Every structure is written in structure tokens, then in C-alpha cells.
Amino acid sequence: MKAIVWMHRDLRLADHPALCGALATVAEGVASRVEVVYAWSDCVYGDWMPGQAQQGWIYEHLQDVLLRLSEYGVRLRVTRQAPSVYVARARGVHGVHFNDPLLPAARQEADRLCREATHRGIAVTQYSGDLLHDPGCIRTQQGNPYSVFTPFSRRFREQVPDEQCEPLAVDWSGGYARGGAGAEAGGGTARARVCAETAHALAHRAQEDLDALGLHAQHIGARPLEASFEVGEAAAHRRLETFAEGPIMGYADRRNWPHHDGTSRLSPYLAIGVLSPRQVFTAVLRARNAAASDADARGVETYVQELIWREFAYHLLHHFPGTPSEPLRLEWSRFPWRDDPAAYVAWQQGRTGFPIVDAGMRQLSQTGWMHNRVRMITASFLTKDLMISWQQGAQWFWHSLIDADLASNTLGWQWAGGCGADAQPYIRIFNPETQLRKHDPDGRYVRTWIHELGDSAYPAPMVDHAVARGRALGAYTSFRKKLRA
Ligand SMILES: Cc1cc2nc3c(=O)[nH]c(=O)nc-3n(C[C@H](O)[C@H](O)[C@H](O)COP(=O)(O)OP(=O)(O)OC[C@H]3O[C@@H](n4cnc5c(N)ncnc54)[C@H](O)[C@@H]3O)c2cc1C
């Protein structure tokens, strides 16, 4: 009898509660082996199948996972079937284990899976693993979800003790030992060591399944990404350790400089679960203990606050699952956004004539990532200067980001569009020139991404910012009047 682990946005082997749970059933002798399943299906993603950039990133990490699993004698099954269908068709299943899915469609699929398994007498176990807290747990005194960050953050810090954030050690020793090419000496109490041929055969079959998905094409299209982000769980941990041992101390001061490597750049790993937030938090706690000055401590605390923003984004997505496509403040669905395909394309291509906007949009298309400050500036430009809807912006980011994350992307775009939780007041409109002077004063960032800056090939500004600002404010004022009438 096998124990199935459904992996979704948790593509890692360490601190993986569902994998731990399944391995424990093997160690106890109630299951004889573990099978890990990854489902590439709209039953898991709904309308939000990963975009082009992230497909390549997922492909690469599935390769990393399948290779490492095969060294333990476990085959990764990659399928287009919904997990509920896969389990219904599988034979000899003792139990199904998975970490709580966070995406709305995946939560519905989890319900179907539970029903299907229960019907067949298969035990289902769900685990918390991809957030520091369960998204339904933190509530106001009246029992409602929070829709403002500061009180959420305060309650979060009261309610989530540091020790609750310890990562789990995954124990393979009850039935598995690492073999294959990378085998270590020893191997604990393993029943059998996997020989190199078996590991190779398992990896080969899993690779064939994976290639059949067609994500490979995206992977080739996305080659330049490799220069920006190293692939794999080991690389993610190296990045985390390097950041937590040094740059985190200066984070409060340097996180707004887009030319500087002052943020952690862990978002691509967190987005698909190569790192768990508990692993990040634990490294941050070590940094907190090592802080040698007030400035260091401020850096660490500011960083903790960003991790709580991520938790807040999931809290909102949990309670308001429709928000990736509709505003949290529903009255905003009637806001008169402009339909301007040519302007939208100029924004996508980084040809607006505003260097800080164009540099950000080019960084996005060339690397699949954009600095947070510049995400805010480019989003403000689209929704305010061009008055194009936040949904169109969110769609493009979803398509282009390797760290595309439904919760954070929705939060960021609704904030910029002025229609979500903690929304930036509509009247606050970023001036791209001022932002450039403040955050990239010597122009290093813009020159990195815009090679033709300063020559005639670079376009003139597509709007007069002062006029565009006036237009946005006018639209907002009359919209508010209509709402009140
Ligand atoms: C319009 C817009 C769209 C965004 N879309 C995404 C997205 O699709 N995926 C994504 O991961 N982030 C998104 N963000 C949030 C933020 O820009 C990125 O998380 C950050 O730039 C990632 O870089 P980093 O890992 O170096 O962040 P750091 O500054 O090192 O922060 C550490 C971690 O905290 C979390 N975090 C930081 N800022 C935020 C935030 N504002 N909201 C939620 N979590 C945060 C991320 O997980 C990040 O990896 C968006 C922000 C905006 C304004």
C-alpha cells in the first residue's frame, strides 16, 4: 500500500509536513512506499495557470525535485489529471497527504480529493506548511478578517510565537536512504539502499512525464532567467543564508534602491515553495540574535514586516477568493478605466518615455523579476497616468514574473489601483521623475536596462505627467461623487 503526497506550490523536500507525514506511515509499517504526485491541471490553478515565465521556473524545480526523490527510490509522478481523479484511479493507496493548498481553485480541488478518498476508504491528512499561520485563524475581536495591514500585523505578532515557526526535519530513515550518484556513506536504519541504476531509471521516467507537459518550451524561451536566479533548493538556501548573514542588516536603508542587491530576492523560491516561510523566518531569527547595532535590528525587523505582508496577502486571498479578478472594495468595479491597447503595449514593452518605468518593465521581461519599488512605480503609472485597469496590469505581471504569486500580486495591484485592502489613496500618484531622482539618483538602474537612453531611439514621454495626473484626479473625484449620489 502506498502513501501519496500531492505537491503543488511546495516544490521542496525539506520542511515539507506532508512528505514527513507520508514517510512516517512508511516508518510505522502502515504504508510500504511513498509516491509523490505533481498535477499540472486547471483543477489546481483555476483561471490562474502559471504564466510563461513561471512555467520555465516550475519546470526547472520539478527537475530538481524528481532527481532528488529518485535518489531515495521515489518516483515523481507528473500528471495532467486532477489529484482527485489521480487518486480515484490509483490502486493500493493507503493514505493521501498534502499541505493546505492556498490558491482558491486548489482549495476546491482539495475538497474534491477528500470526498473521493473518503468514499474509497483512503485516509486523507492535511498539514499546514506554506504560511507561518493558518490564514483563517487571525481575526479581529469581532471575528472578522482583517482588511488593514497594521492591526493584522500586530495581532499576527501576538498570536504567532517564534517557536511555532520552527521548520520540520524530514526523516527518511524509516524506509528510505539516499542512494544514486550522490549517495553518502552510512544511511541510518534504511531498509534498502537505492542503487544508482534504479535511481537513474526512476529519474528518467519522471523526466519523460515532465517533458510531456510541454513546459520545456517555456524553459528554453526563458534562458536569461538562469543568470538572475540559480535553480534548486540548495541554491535557495545559499541565497537565504547569504542574505541573513549580511545584507539583511542594511535592509531598512537599502531596500528602496533598485540598482542595489539590497533585498533578499527570495520571492521566486517562496512563490513556488522551494523555500518555506518557516525556513526563512528561522534564518531571520538567527539574524535578529546576531544584530550588532540599532540599524541592524531595524533591518531585521523591517524584513520580518515584509514576511508578514506576504501572510496578509494570503489572509486576504483566503477570505476574499474572488479578489484576483474583482476589487476588494466592490464599488470600484464600476470605475471608468480607459481602454487603450496602444498605451498598454508601450507600457508592457518599456517604451513609455519615462526611464524608471521603462527600466522596470524591461527588467521584468528580461529577467522575470522586478524590484519592489519599481513594481509600485510601474503599477502607479499604468493605473493613474494611463488610467488602465489594475486587472490588465496584474495579468501582465502574472504572465511575466517568475515569482508570480496570486496573493501578493493581487494585493500589490489593488493597492496601486486604489481599490483594495490598505489601498494607496487614489489621490497619491507617483511622479516618475521624482521617484527616479529619489531612488536612482545616479541613474545606474535605468542605464542598466535602457541602453538607448539619451539618444534619439529612446521615445519621448507618452504623456505629460501633470496633465495625466489631473485627468486621473478628475475621474476619481467624479466617481466618488457618483458613488455618494
Ligand atoms: C504591483 C505589485 C505586484 C506584485 N506582485 C508580486 C508577485 O506576484 N509575487 C510576489 O512574491 N510579490 C509580489 N509583489 C510584492 C513585492 O514586490 C515582491 O514580493 C518583492 O519585490 C520580491 O523581492 P524580494 O524577494 O527581494 O523581496 P524582499 O524585499 O526581500 O522581501 C522578502 C519577502 O517578503 C515578501 N514581500 C515583500 N514585499 C511584499 C509585498 N508588498 N507584498 C507581499 N509580500 C511581500 C516576499 O515574499 C519577499 O520575497 C508585488 C508588489 C507590487 C507593488
Image: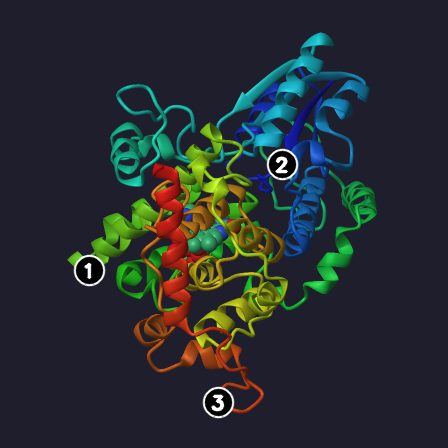
- Looking at marks 1 and 2 on the same chain, the residue that comes earlier in the sequence is marked by 2
The residue most toward the left is 294
Residue for point 46% across, 33% down: 168
- In the picture of the structure, the residue carrying the numbered disc 3 is 454
- Distance of label 1 from label 3 (alpha carbons): 38 Å
Label 3, residues with CA under 10 Å away: few <14, some 14-19, many ≥20: few
Q: At 21% across and 53% down in the image, what residue appears?
A: 297
Give me the residue at 41% from left, 59% from top. 472
Residue 113 in the image, given as x and y percentages of width and height:
67, 20
Badge 2: how crowded within 10 Å, few (<14), some, or many (20+)?
many
Which amino acid does the dot numbered 2 rest on? Answer: His
Kind of element beneath mark 1 = helix
What is the three-letter code of the residue carrying label 1?
Answer: Ala
Closer to viewer: mark 2 or mark 3: 3
Residue placed most toward the observer, 366 or 414: 414
Circle 3: residue type? Gly
Q: Secondary structure at mark 3?
A: loop
Q: Cβ–Cβ below 8 Å for labels 1 and 2?
A: no
Q: Position of residue 225 (x, y in %)?
A: 61, 64
How many labels sit on residues?
Answer: 3
The quadrant where residue 278 appears:
top left
Question: Which label number is shown at residue 295?
Answer: 1
Whether residue 454 sits left or right of residue 443 in the image: it is right
Q: Where 397 sits versus 90, above or below?
A: below
Residue in view at x 69 percent, y 42 percent: 71
Q: Which mark is residue 8?
A: 2
Q: Is mark 2 within 8 Å of ligand 1?
A: no
Residue 117 spot, x, y in % from top left: 69, 14
